[in-house]
Image (tube, rainbow, N blue to C red):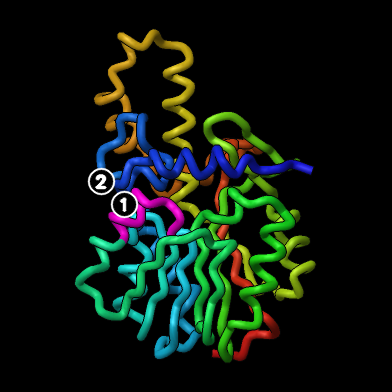
Amino acid sequence: MAEIDRAAVKQYWENAEATVLGPYMMDGFGFPVGAGNFRFRAETRIVRRLVANIRHKDKVLDLGSGVGYWAEEFAGNFSKVVAVEGSAKLFRALAERCAPYANVEPILGNVMAFEPGGSYSLVFSGGLLMYLNESDVIELLRRLAPRLGPDGIILCRESTVRGETVKRDGEYSVIYRSVPEYAQIFKRCGLVLHSVERNEPYVLMQMGCELIKTWKSFVPERFQALWMMGRLTYWSLRLGNPWINRIPQALGIPFPRLENHFFVLGAGPMASG
């Protein structure tokens, strides 16, 4: 079974750039900052729709908060946000971003050691599970499930692969699982998988990342002109959105190699909204 190098994960995120591009893994491709902002705004519309039917008077637990964009988003829509981040560098950006919001409680700490108190209408995990071993994922979700309030949900946004699990070692240690594999893990936790939705903004930007990676692999560094190619790729994708996302699927081409999905989980059948 694939195992995560915890020390490598910690080191990577301690050195990550505290920008909108850094946590999205979009640094080094020549993309403008607007690319990260576009993706976050588009994902925000999806998340707002997915959480529309839960109680907004209750608390949110944001695990792996990064630089705080999601904590800030939730602060404007829920009564209380507990935001947990393990990287000291990203935590400083999180605390600064959320300082104007009295209802945000930033916590610096490992999510596996964090003991949630009270109940939550929403537990949000935005790209956390892929940095955990399967046993850790199960332990974490089993600990969170009893903390869900009435009609509460766990919303996970995770990068995925179409086939067998892919593990990457070295400086960037990560485990990419398939949608069926995540479904099995959630079932083992006693959670109900209410819905799965492909994260189209992620897929669009991932197309750009993989195209630029290909460009960098064939073109000598001094001729890559990433400042130009990154912007050209980004705006070409934006102009082709949303139709360009559908072309690989229509042709049966597994591109991009990485996808991303939203998983809506509950402790039992969701009440009708």
Left or right of residue 177, residue 211 in this image: left
Badge 2 element = helix
What residue type is disc 1 on?
A: Phe
| Above or below 270: residue 221 | above
| Above or below 103: residue 93 | above
The stretch of residues the image draws in magenta is: 85-94
Q: Does the magenta stretch include residue 51?
A: no
Q: Mark 2 points at which residue?
A: 34
What residue type is disc 2 on?
A: Gly
* Residue 38 tag number: 1
Residue found at x 58% / y 38%: 173
Name the foreground residue: 155 vs 189: 189
Q: Is disc 2 surrounded by few (<14), some (14 to 19) or many (20+) residues within 10 Å?
A: few
Left or right of residue 209, residue 90 in this image: left
Task: Work out whether residue 238 can be spotted.
Answer: no
Looking at the rendered structure, the number of numbered marks drawn on it comes to 2
